[in-house]
Image: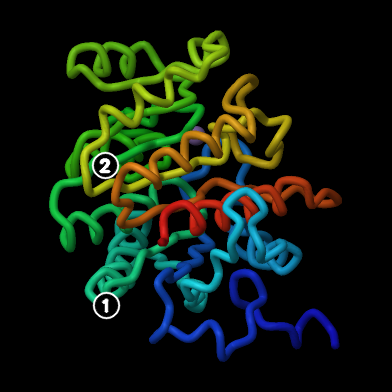
């Protein structure tokens, strides 16, 4: 059997086990990166994650169960909207609206970070004001960037319309973003502070500041690039693999997560390290959030 004949869904599940009707989680691949400012290629992220996900072990040794049993359906990749990022965000929101209305947990695979505005908007419409947890190297608090308020560099600023945003792993921002963050009292857990916190007390502090319902947006550059080197705008430092998992697990155990995303994988030819880690992370999120 060639790759083309294997199921194209997340985790390569048999189609009968991956129907929309019985799924608790709906995976929404969005291959789009029109506002990328440095390394483009996030448009290839969803396909790389889906491909790598076939190699992910379905049994989770940490949780002692098989998270895929909650039902995981994968939608067809969303076609790019040529009118620009705002139109693309609207298209994401429309699909995510349906998932929320049907009681599903949407898991969006980007694609650039601006797409999170679409899933967050849908989750806020369905569930009310959100606590948004943003794992990211970048504050993404610019009001506008390269002529558009819907750039990836403005993602967190746009998310503020739908609830409080807590940034984790942040280690790159402009003076204007710093000023805005200080003036408006943004909750930011700096990567440099997390690195010095040997007891991981920051995790308690992050979770304490989150109120139900919660949305988790995971920009992969929030992780140390030693874990996932293939992102459009890598930054040294950042969360280790087990630090990230510990945070996500605690959030899932103590809060109600209504939606999530994994964005900004820009696959590097010749290496599957990042693709596989991103797929594994997305499956970990299913295990922690969809119970
Ligand atoms: Mn980022």
Residue 59, how many percent across, how many down? 66, 63
Q: Depth check: give the residue in front, 16 or 3.
A: 16
Q: Tell me the tag on residue 159.
A: 2
Label 1: few (<14), some (14–19) or many (≥20) C-alpha neighbours in 10 Å? few
Q: Eyeballing the image, is 211 above or below 50?
A: above
Furthest toward the front, the residue is 64
* Between marks 2 and 1 in the image, the one whose residue lies nearer the viewer: 1
Quadrant of the image containing the N terminus: bottom right
Quadrant of the image containing the C terminus: bottom left
Q: Depth check: give the residue in front, 207 or 121.
A: 207
Q: Eyeballing the image, is 97 above or below 192?
A: below
Q: Would you say the beta carbon of the disc 2 residue lies within 8 angstroms of ligand 1?
A: no
* Secondary structure of residue under mark 2: helix
| Residue that badge 1 annotates | 102
Residue drawn at point x = 39 percent, y = 36 percent: 134
Residue 235, how many percent across, how many down? 61, 24
């Amino acid at each position: 059997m060639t790759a083309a004949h294997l199921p194209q869904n997340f985790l390569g599940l048999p189609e009968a086990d991956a129907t929309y009707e019985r799924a608790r989680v709906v995976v929404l691949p969005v291959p789009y990166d029109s506002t990328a400012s440095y390394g483009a290629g996030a448009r290839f992220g969803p396909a790389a994650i889906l491909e790598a996900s076939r190699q992910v072990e379905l049994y989770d040794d940490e949780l002692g169960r098989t998270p895929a049993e909650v039902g995981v359906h994968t939608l067809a990749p969303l076609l790019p909207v040529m009118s620009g990022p705002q139109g693309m965000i609207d298209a994401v929101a429309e699909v995510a609206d349906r998932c929320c209305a049907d009681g599903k947990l949407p898991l969006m695979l980007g694609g650039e970070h601006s797409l999170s505005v679409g899933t967050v908007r849908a989750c806020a419409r369905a569930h009310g004001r959100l606590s948004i947890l943003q794992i990211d190297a970048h504050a993404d608090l610019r009001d506008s960037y390269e002529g558009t308020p819907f750039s990836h560099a403005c993602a967190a600023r746009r998310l503020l319309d739908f609830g409080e945003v807590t940034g984790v792993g942040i280690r790159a921002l402009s003076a204007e973003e710093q000023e805005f963050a200080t003036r408006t009292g943004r909750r930011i857990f700096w990567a440099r502070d997390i690195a010095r916190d040997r007891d991981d007390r920051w995790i308690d502090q992050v979770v304490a500041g989150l109120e139900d319902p919660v949305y988790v947006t995971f920009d992969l550059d929030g992780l140390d690039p030693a874990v996932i080197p293939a992102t459009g705008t890598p930054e040294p430092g950042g969360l280790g693999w087990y630090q990230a998992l510990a945070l996500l697990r605690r959030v899932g155990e103590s809060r109600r997560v209504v939606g999530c995303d994994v964005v900004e994988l820009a696959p590097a030819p010749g290496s599957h390290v990042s693709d596989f880690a991103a797929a594994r992370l997305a499956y970990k999120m299913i295990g922690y959030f969809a119970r």
